[in-house]
Amino acid sequence: MSSSTPAGFMGLELCALSRQVGSHTLVDQLSLQVAPGEILALLGPSGCGKSSTLRLIAGLDRASSGEIRLGGRVITALAPAERQVAMVFQSYALFPHLSVERNLSLGMELRGLAKAEIQHQLEQVLALMQLEGLRQRKPAELSGGQRQRVALARALIRRPALFLLDEPMSNLDAQLRDNLRAELRTLLRSTGVPVVYVTHDQHEAMGLADRIAVLREGRLQQLGTAETLYRDPTNRFVARFLGSPSINLIERGEEQLGLRPELLELAEAGSPVPQGWEALEGELSHREWLGDRVISHVHCPGQASLKVLSREAPADGALQLRWRQAHALRFEARSGKRLPGSGAAHPS
Amino acid sequence: MARLLLLLWSLGPMLWQLVSSLRTSDALSGLASGGWTLEHYRQLLQGDPPFLTYLLNSAVVGVCSTALTLALAVPCAYALTRIGRRQARSLTLLVAAAAAFPAVLLFLALLELARDWHLANQLLALSLPYAGLCLPLAILLLQAAFADIPIELEEAALIEGMGLWQRLRWVLLPLLAPAMASSALLVFLFSWNEYPIALTWLSRTELLTLAPAMARIAGSSVYTIPYGAFAAATVLGSAPLIALMLLFQRQIISGLTQGAIKG
C-alpha cells in the first residue's frame, strides 16, 4: 500500500496500521500520509479509533500490525521518547505540582540540556505564547485558555519532529474556540513538521486542517480536503458527518437521495416543476432563525423532517420542496454506499 | 455547645493523665490533699535506663518500619494500578484479605521465626513484622491515590522522555505526597503503640520500646500502683505523636479523604 509513496517521503506515513485488543479492532488497516507542514485532522464520532490512532503514532500503545514511518525512518517499535513527538492532551496533562516555568523545563532538565540553553529556549517559548506574566503560576491558577497555551508551549519547546493534538479545544468554551482556531493554525503551520489533529468537531477540522481523514469503527472512510469531503463524499456516513445542518436524506425505495440543506428550494405548494428538477409536497413544521439565514424544517409524508437553509423565512402552511436532480447524491439505502454518476454537477 | 462537649469528651482523658502526672503520689492515693510535683518526670528521666531511651527506641523502630513499608508499598500500589484491570481486582482482593487478617493469629509463628533467624533482641528486626502487618493497608491507601492521578500525566512524562524512576520521582510521588504522609503516619502510629510482638521479641531492658517499657513501670512493684509515674510515661509517650499530628495534619486529612470526591 505504501508503494504509491515517493521514496524518501519526509513526513509521517501510516502503512496498513492496525490495533486489536482482544477480539476488538480499534484501528483497522489504516494508511495515510501527512507531509511536513501539513495539518491533518482525524475526524469521527467517539469510539471511531481516532484517539487510538494518535496513541499508536505517539507510541503510547503498541501496533498489532502495520508500520509507522517518520522522516523515512520506521518508528513502529520505538519508545515514545525516541520518536521525538510532542503531544497535547485533551486534559492538557500539565503537572499540577509544578509552576508553568517548571512544567516547560522539566523535560529538558531531565534530558540533560545545559542550563543556559534551557533558559534561552524557555524565554523564547514564553514570549511566543505570551506566558511571561504567568511563569510562576501553578496550573490550577490558570484559565482554560492559559492552560492550553502552556500545553502547546510544552509541546513546542520539545522541538518535535511530529506534532500530535488530541482534542485540544474541547475544554474551551465555544467563543474562545472560534477565536483560537486561526491562531492555532498559524502556530502549527510555523513548526514545519507534520501535524495530526484529532477532533470530533467538524468545524474545527474544517477550519484548521489542510486535509481531513474521516474514521469510522477504526476504518478510514475518506481522506481529502474539507471541500472534497463536503461536495463529493464517498458514502452516507461521510456525507452525514460533515455539514451543519446535516445533509437531508430522502427515501427512494432502494436508494436514498442526499441533499444539502442549501441546495433545497422552497416554492408555493402545487407549483409546476421545471425540467431537470424534482419536487416533494410538504408542510412547514417550524423555523430556526439564525440571523443571516433561516433553517426551515419541512415535513413531507413518508420522509423524515427535511431541513432547508434559505435567506428568507417561508410562510406557514403547505409548500413545495424542490431541487435540481443533478445536485442529489445517490446512496444505496442499505449499505450507505455512494452510487456512481450522482452529484456531479455541484454548484461552486 | 455540642462542640465543646465533644472536645471535653476527647481531651478529658488526656488532661486527666496530665494532671495526674503532676500530682504527688500521696495526693493521687488520697492520703493527702493538694501538692504539685515534677517528681514523677524526674524519676522517669533519671531512671536506669532513662525513659528517653525507650522513646528513642520506639522512634527508631517507627521510622524504620515506616520507611520499609513505604518502600515496598509504593511499587506494589503502582504496579496494581498499571496492570490489567482484571488481574488488579483479584490481587487487590487478596491484599484486602491480608489487611483484614487477625494479626493475633500470627504471634506464635512470628516468635518461632524470631528464634530460628536469631531476631530476638534486635531492635531493627522489629520493623520486619511491623512492615509486614502494615503493608496491606498501606498498599490499599496508596493504590487509591495512584488511581486518582490521571494516566495522561504519566503519558505526558513518557513522551517527554522520562524513564520510570524519573516519572516516579518528578511526577507521581509529589502528587502522592498527601497519601504517603497519611500512610506513613498510620504505620508509625501502629509501631509506636504495638505491644505483644515487642513484648515477646525484646527482653533486654535497654532495647525496650515504649509499650513494653510502660508495662514494666506499671508492674514494677507488687504493693503499690505507681499512678504518677505511669501517667507521666503516658504523657511523655504521646507527646511526640501529638506533635507529629499537628505538624502534618493538613496532609493527613487530605490524604485520608482522597478519592472521596472526584476533583
Image: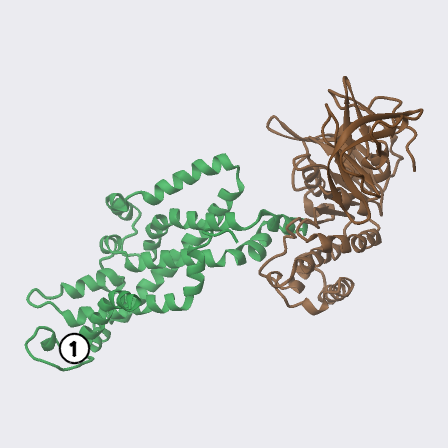
Chain colours: A brown, B green
Residue A154 appears at what percent x and percent y? 71, 57
- Residue placed at 36% from the left, 69% from the top? B243
Task: Determine the image quadrant of residue B166.
Answer: bottom right
| Amino acid type indicated by mark 1 | Arg
What subunit carries mark 1? Answer: B
Q: Quadrant of residue A27?
A: top right
Q: Choose between B150 and B104: the one closer to the eye.
A: B150
- The vertical placement of B32 against B148, above or below, is below
Q: Say whether residue A100 is left or right of residue A296.
A: left
- In the picture as drawn, the residue positioned furthest to the top comes out as A254
Circle 1 sits in a helix, a strand or a loop, which is it? loop
Relative depth, front residue between A270 and B237: A270
Residue A266: where, in percent of width, then height?
Answer: 84, 34
Residue occupying image coordinates x 41% and y 50%: B138
Residue B129 visible at all: yes
Q: Residues within 10 Å of mark 1 (few under 14, many from 20)?
A: many
Q: Which residue, given by chain and number where applicable, does mark 1 sit on?
A: B23
